[in-house]
Amino acid sequence: MITIGVLDLQGAVIEHVDKINNISGATALRVKNVKDLEDIDGLIIPGGESTTIGKLLRDFNMLSPLKSKIESGMPVWGTCAGMIILAKSILGSDYNHLGVMGIEVRRNAYGSQLDSFITDEIVEGVSEEKIPLVFIRAPYVEKAHEGVKVLCSLDEKIIACRENNMLATSFHPELTKDLSMHKYFYNMCKDRLK
Ligand code: GLN
């Protein structure tokens, strides 16, 4: 059984937990502290508010232990705010959070909550058919460093990418019926244990 953690400090946690528990061979663990990081094979950082998630990671002294785990190869997937948490740089800010993934992100790149939208696209390596993508005050990747593989772009902006053990999506697959992004991440976790 592969244990996939969902960082449970703020944001869309339950939806990811439900998705993971629907994959046979996977079980979800809500990660609330440093100790929980020892019990997982991979971690999802959910959507929510990146400034809040970042602050709580610092307040609970989870930032540097989590960073080391990712740097030593633990698979991680950031959705929306989670993408911002992973990024090496955030446009217009002189700070970052985990700063592990070679991407520069633009926050709220599509406007406010009222500008939320759904579209369908093929995500390379994830699904051969178009899957529904939900954008809620989403970021996109403004610049990707060498070594970052683009999995999906929308209007020439990168909205899904991967760098080794790190996966980032601008959108929220946990809010749709489709399970393919979660299965893709499950396979990343499984492959690491081979
Ligand atoms: N706009 C939020 C942020 O900057 C992200 C929104 C989301 O995760 N749905 O953190």
Image (cartoon, rainbow, N blue to C red):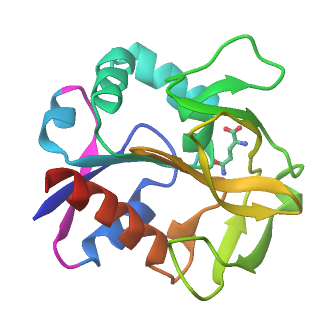
Taking the spot 80% from the left edge, 26% from the top edge, the residue there is 91
Q: Is residue 34 at least partly visible in the picture? A: yes
Q: Please state the horizontal and vertical placement of residue 187, each as a whole percent of the image.
A: 30, 65
Taking the spot 54% from the left edge, 42% from the top edge, the residue there is 82
* Ligand 1 found in image quarter: top right
Taking the spot 37% from the left edge, 42% from the top edge, the residue there is 7
User: Residue 179 lies in magenta, yes or no?
Assistant: no
Q: Please state the horizontal and vertical placement of residue 129, each as a whole percent of the image.
A: 60, 89
Determine the image quadrant of residue 64: top left
Q: Please state the horizontal and vertical placement of residue 121, each as a whole percent of the image.
A: 71, 77
Q: Residue furthest left?
A: 1
Quarter containing the N terminus: bottom left
Taking the spot 37% from the left edge, 72% from the top edge, the residue there is 183
Q: Residue furthest bottom?
A: 129
User: Residue 27 lies in magenta, yes or no?
Assistant: yes
Instruction: Say left or right for 65 vs 51.
Output: left
| Span colored in magenta | 24-34
